[in-house]
Image (cartoon, rainbow, N blue to C red):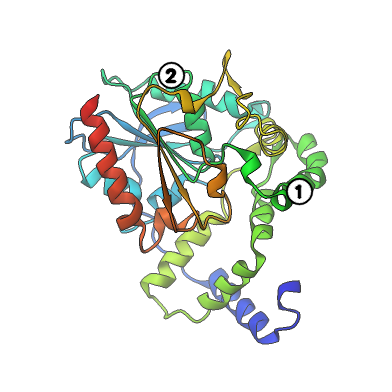
Amino acid sequence: MAQTQHDPLLRARALAGLTRYQDATRPTRPKAAKVHAVSGVARLLYYGSGESGGPPIVVIPSLINPPDVLDLSERISLMRWLATQGHDVFLVDWGHPDAADRSMNLSGHIITRLVPLLQTLEEKVPPVLVGYCLGGTLAAGAAACFPVSALVTIATPWDFDGFSDKVRQEIAHLWRDAKPFCQKAGYVPMEVLQSGFWALDPARTIAKYADFGEMQEGSDAMTAFMALEDWANAGPPLTYAASEELFEELYQANVTGLAQWKVGEDAVRPEQLTVPSLSIRSSTDRIVPATSAPALAESWTLDMGHVGMIVGSRARQQLWEPLSQWLFKHGAEC
């Protein structure tokens, strides 16, 4: 490990923490939500109570990693907390793509997976879409071809010129190396994507395992770390077509930021939405910089990390509660 070549103590701590993580007993997953609808391998899960009487809230995660970060545990779950507030809330689970899906690109996920799920909502008021990370990009695409009451994006990449040249070069290099195998296989394994995330901040990856090795056995911090790391290290592969579009059209060509990305017939321009819209970004996000977020009618800038804004110790105060209030306000306007 190049990051620890001059610090053998840190290396030993990190390796001890990694071994502890691998050998530890896993925390129990929360009870599964009810399946409301299915479209191909994708599912729409229902968490809400509907007591608020507002429009349905559909939360859309990234295609990368499972949706579990939004429902990490009974205590750390944006989905379950929104339901306790009275929101009628649903979560998209993209599922595991099969061989027939290899040619499905990002817009294909919207048109053949997401929109059919949204069409199963029989409420008279269109849904509010809340997208996290790449799920926000897909939510913006869906809002361009399906009626919605409002759009919220959280830590969402849109203007890829907002990424540093260094990051875009590293991602381009990663894709060049992985593309021949992925093209032949028809998918991109999670390990390829994960290596790109590690490369963004290798020092932090080492430090977090070093710290984990010294956490109190059975503590809330230890349980939360394992649940989060299991989520971050898991996930189905991406279809080849979606990966090719993500790396070549979005990261390299910035088709979204230049309003050249089409879902259906028209280019997607979320800044021209006539419904309420909110972009939530973070000034300390190492994965999706604030400068890449879409320009929507409203914007909030937090000082929490990409994942921390969803599951961190300050997430409820800084994101969950203000988001719930925003949803209530705009739900009442529908």
Within-10-Å neighbours for mark 2: few <14, some 14–19, many 20+: some
| Residue depicted at x 46% and y 69% | 25
Instruction: Check disc 2 and give the amino acid type.
Output: Phe
Looking at the image, is 141 positioned above or below residue 90? Answer: above
Looking at the image, is 9 positioned above or below residue 229? Answer: below
Q: Position of residue 36 (x, y in %)?
A: 34, 30
Q: Name the residue beneath numbered marker 1.
A: 169
> Residue 308's image quarter?
bottom left
> In the picture, which quadrant includes the C terminus?
top left
| Residue depicted at x 59% and y 43% | 236
The residue sitting at the top extreme is 265
Mark drawn on residue 61: none
Mark drawn on residue 146: 2
| Disc 1 element | helix
> Residue 26's image quarter?
bottom left
Q: Position of residue 223 (x, y in %)?
A: 41, 68
Q: Earlier in the sequence, mark 2 or mark 1?
A: 2
Instruction: Check disc 1 and give the amino acid type.
Output: Gln
